[in-house]
Image (tube, helix red, strand yellow):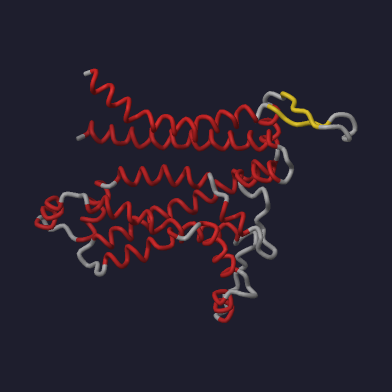
Amino acid sequence: MKARTRAATILLTPFFVLFTAVMVVPIGYAVWLSLFTEKQSGLGFGGTETVFTGLDNYTAALGDRAFREGFGVLLGYCLFYIPLLLAGALGLALLLDSALARARRFFQLALFLPHAVPGIIAALIWVYLYTPQLSPVVKAMEAGGIGFDFFSPEGALPSVVNIALWEWLGYNVVIFYAALQAIDRSVLEAATVDGAGAWRIAFSIKVPLVKASLAMVGIFTIIGSLQLFTEPLILSKGTGSAVTSTWTPNMYAYTAAFDRNDYGLAAAASVLLALTAALLSFAVTRLTGRRAARKERTA
């Protein structure tokens, strides 16, 4: 027993050391930093001094309309992006797993390749494709009588969603496809013998059996969506873009820290965003857990 405990301690120690160094310590420092602010003495000609302000930075962030509107943007982004990503990735994975699919390895690689492109590079590529004076896509749309401004207030959100889908769809297809491949083939063969068609097998057998993967991808997608930063930051550089420097909470914190040098406010905004992500993750986990428990009881 002691040998097992010692072995477990040795194996887990590197993880906890790394976790503490890259997660616990930075979060603790951010919380500490959020309780202070820098103020200039006198009429602004003296040096700056760090002053303890308690929860004033949190009050300032929550009282700022730009910060609150950033959460509204995130809500719209999540409602638009997450269903499209989950449905698209699961649908493509089911298609690849079907008996009708050909050249599966090729399509897996082709779908995964966009994820291998760094986010900044992907955003720059799409900004080029969105710019009317440069983009062959916009010119082709205009030639067909379709006018759409990707940088307008109405087009900014779909533009960012499109970039994110291009980056992450293939990655999640691979996850769902691996889960589908792990299904016992005898179950599918029995369903076929019982007369179930391809659609019935896909949505009545395969999808319920990969719900754990679906929930996991959903949680990670929610957390990643709340951290939206790179794509809108690059998109904000476009000509006449409606994406402002405070378009999302992450951009708000970045602007507060590096444009206004208000690190206390930036830390407070980051902590509030982290708490939101933690609460949503907890809610989704509890919801999926309760549903699984109910099904086990009924079974």
Q: In which quarter of the image is residue 110?
A: bottom left
Q: Quadrant of residue 177?
A: bottom left
Q: Which of 199 and 125 is in front in this view?
A: 125
| Relative to 157, 218 lies left or right | left
| Relative to 196, 230 lies left or right | right
Specify the farthest residue to the bottom. Answer: 143
Q: Position of residue 71 (x, y in %)?
A: 59, 43
Q: Position of residue 131 (x, y in %)?
A: 62, 70
Image quarter where the N terminus lies is top left
Q: Which residue is at 27% across, 47% downward?
A: 210
Q: Quadrant of residue 201?
A: bottom left
Q: In the figure, 120 relative to 10: above or below?
A: below
Total number of numbered discs in the rendering: 0
Q: In the figure, 69 relative to 298: above or below?
A: below
Q: Which residue is at 63% across, 63% downward?
A: 151
Q: In the figure, 33 relative to 126: above or below?
A: above
Q: Which residue is at 70% across, 27% downward?
A: 36
Q: Where is residue 56 in the image (x, y as percent from the top left)?
A: 70, 28
Q: Which residue is at 53% across, 51% downward?
A: 77
Specify the farthest residue to the top. Answer: 2
Q: Where is residue 91 in the image (x, y as percent from the top left)?
A: 33, 59
Image quarter where the C terminus lies is top left
Q: Which of 114 and 16 is in front in this view?
A: 16
| Relative to 200, 18 lies left or right | right
Q: Nearer the viewer, residue 183 or 73?
A: 183
